[in-house]
Amino acid sequence: MVSASRILAVLAASLLVLVAACRPATGQSGTGQNGDGHDDAPAVSVASAELIENAPAVGESVERTDAEWREQLTDEQYRVLREHGTERAFTGEYHDHHGDGVYRCAGCGAPLFDSDTKFDSGTGWPSYYEPIADGRVGESRDASLGMVRTEVHCAACGGHLGHVFPDGPPPTGQRYCINSASLAFEPRATPDDEDDS
Ligand SMILES: [Zn+2]
């Protein structure tokens, strides 16, 4: 009989411990109230190893048939790169992306812009003050939509990127206003990364 009441007491004590153990946990879980969004940085797609490996050198041109582009690109990439489309502001995946690395052409993999030159233009499109290197980004006159603008494209594959405007920040004063759909981000390798692939 004594042992029965002792067991009850132990059980009651255990319950108290359990309840007490749960309390702080529930109290602290407030930091996770964003549901699945436990990562601070928004997820963005990155350039595939194949795209990077086959990237053209400066001066090299990439020729593909329309059918090949259609097969390789997503519908949105095709519409922007090959049909001079424009993605809606604030909808692309890189306009609010602040990763350290290189933005490549989503069509041919050519490096186009460095994250060091990216700035927040407030336009809803990724914006850079200069291309990554001479010979990577070509320009053409665009008189569509009742205005004259300077269109910019990938010098290697001709893929449409966006436009450049003379209202950018120092040191160049240029604003390369680029569609996210034209780009594929390659995170910069840190010195700690071993080449163990
Ligand atoms: Zn390209």
Image (tube, rainbow, N blue to C red):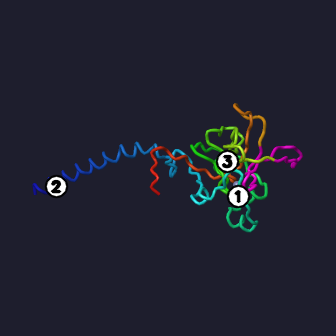
Q: Residue at x 70, y 58 (%)?
A: 77
Going from N to C along the chain, the mark reached first, 1 or 2, is: 2
Is the residue marked 3 within 8 Å of ligand 1, measured from its CB?
A: yes
Q: Which residue is mark 3?
A: 112
Numbered disc 3: secondary structure:
strand
In the image, what residue occupies the spot 16% across and 55% down?
7
Report the residue marked by disc 1.
77
CA separation in Å, label 2 and label 3? 72 Å
Q: Nearer the viewer, mark 1 or mark 2?
A: 1
**Picture quadrant of residue 150:** top right
> How far apart, in angstroms, are the residues tagged by discs 3 and 1?
16 Å
- Does residue 112 belong to the magenta stretch? no
Identify which amino acid the numbered label 2 is placed on: Ile
146 in the magenta segment? yes
Q: Which residues are magenta?
A: 140-163
Tell me whether circle 2 and circle 3 mark residues in contact (CB < 8 Å). no
Residue for point 72% across, 46% down: 135
Q: Position of residue 144 (x, y in %)?
A: 87, 49
Between 121 and 164, the one lying in front of the other is 164
Which residue is at the front of the view, 5 or 125?
125
Instruction: Give the position of the N terminus as an image quadrant.
Output: bottom left
Residue type, numbered disc 3: Leu
Q: For residue 7, which numbered disc appears in the image?
A: 2
Residue 180 pos. (x, y %): 68, 50
Q: Quadrant of residue 65?
A: bottom right
Marks 3 & 1, CB-CB < 8 Å contact: no
User: Please, what is the three-letter code of the amino acid marked with disc 1?
Assistant: Gln
Mark 1 vs mark 2, CA separation in Å: 69 Å
